[in-house]
Amino acid sequence: MSFMEPFRISTVEPLSNLTSEERLKILQESGYNPFQVKDKYVTFDLWTDSGTAAMSQHQWAAMLETSEGCISPDSFDTFADTIKRLTGFPHILPVHQGRAAEHILFSVLAKPGSTVFSNTMYITGRANAELSGAVVVDVPCKQVEGGDFNGDLDLRRVDVGKAMVVLTLTSNNQAGQPVSMANIKHVSEICKTHDVPLFMDGCRFAENAYFIKTRTKVYQDVSARDIALEMFSHFDGMYMSAKKDGLCNIGGFFATRLSDVYGQFKRRMTYTWGIQAMVDYLAGTWKL
């Protein structure tokens, strides 16, 4: 067991160290609304996990060394190949953050009158699905005190007639409760039976894989990476904010094995964000 952090801190960021009187004054001036408190007054932010990680020396170095060319930079190939090896999905597209992927995906798949079922949809995902005219229905499992997988989706409450399903791993709106591999498999089987797309909000996929490893006996000797790869194999695709388990300051990606959805997603990126789609258009590989 290690008794020290196995790395050296080379960059520091000052934290506020306010007195009780100063904190009370700031709360009063903000109307007791934490969202009105400036970040500079917050010592420990327990509300978000986005962008709170420190980037490694290799990440910073890669940002300086990478090509900034906008047509076909090597950095995109490195990015796409890395995600393909990690997830097994063949089609990869970058986005500037997770909600950009939500916006494009739901504009493609969440049609007016359709239903999107989820264990618990994150607030930006819900907003983007509803913006596309769909109805979002959260069907979390019944919470069990001390339960290992309180992030599971309640299969008894899902009617996938005209729907798509999104599993959030881990379940953000349920305080990061993990989803079991058994639940993932059962949801996938139902979706395949009814020809319904199943996507992962992979905000904390690595954390979810670790929970499966530590809380499921048959996976105790399996690496978290292999568990994650098995999780991905049951989905048609995923979207992710890389500011969480990607340990990046910004960014994210969309990945899928559905070539038709990939094509529609790429075309939508031309209108909103993404040079790679425009390159294909100029090359004549697809038309608007």
Image (cartoon, helix red, strand yellow):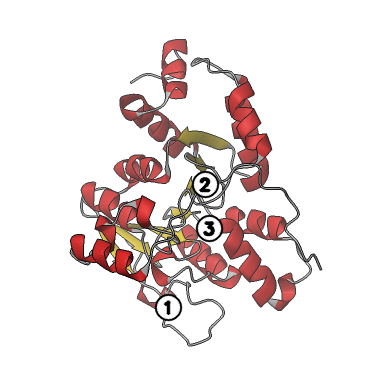
Q: Position of residue 211 (x, y in %)?
A: 62, 69
The quadrant in which the N terminus is found is: bottom right
Sequence-first tag of 2 and 1: 2
Residue 277, image x, y percentages: 43, 23
Q: Is residue 267 above or below residue 228?
A: above
Q: Are marks 3 and 1 in contact (CB under 8 Å)?
A: no
Q: Which mark is residue 239?
A: none
Discs 3/2, front? 2
Note whether residue 48 is visible. yes
Dot 3 lies on which element? loop
Residue positioned 65% across, 42% down in the render: 10
Q: Residue at x 50, y 15 (%)?
A: 71
On the image, numbered disc 2 is attached to which residue?
13
Residue at label 1? 141
Looking at the image, which residue is at 45% across and 51% down? 50
Residue 285 visible in image = no
- Asked whether, in this view, residue 76 is left or right of residue 37, the answer is right
- Secondary structure beneath dot 2 equals loop
Q: Name the residue carrying label 3.
A: 204
Which is nearer the N-term, disc 3 or disc 2? 2
- Which mark is first along the chain, 1 or 3? 1
Is label 3 or label 1 in front?
Answer: 3
Observer-nearest of 258 and 41:
41
Quick check: 139 left or right of 198? Answer: left
Assess disc 3: are there few (<14), some (14-19) or many (≥20) residues with their C-alpha within 10 Å of its C-alpha.
many
Query: Crowdedness of circle 2 by 10 Å Cα count: few (<14), some, many (20+)?
Result: few
Spot occupied by residue 182 in the image (x, y as percentages of width and height): 58, 72
For image coordinates 63% across by 36% down, the residue present is 59
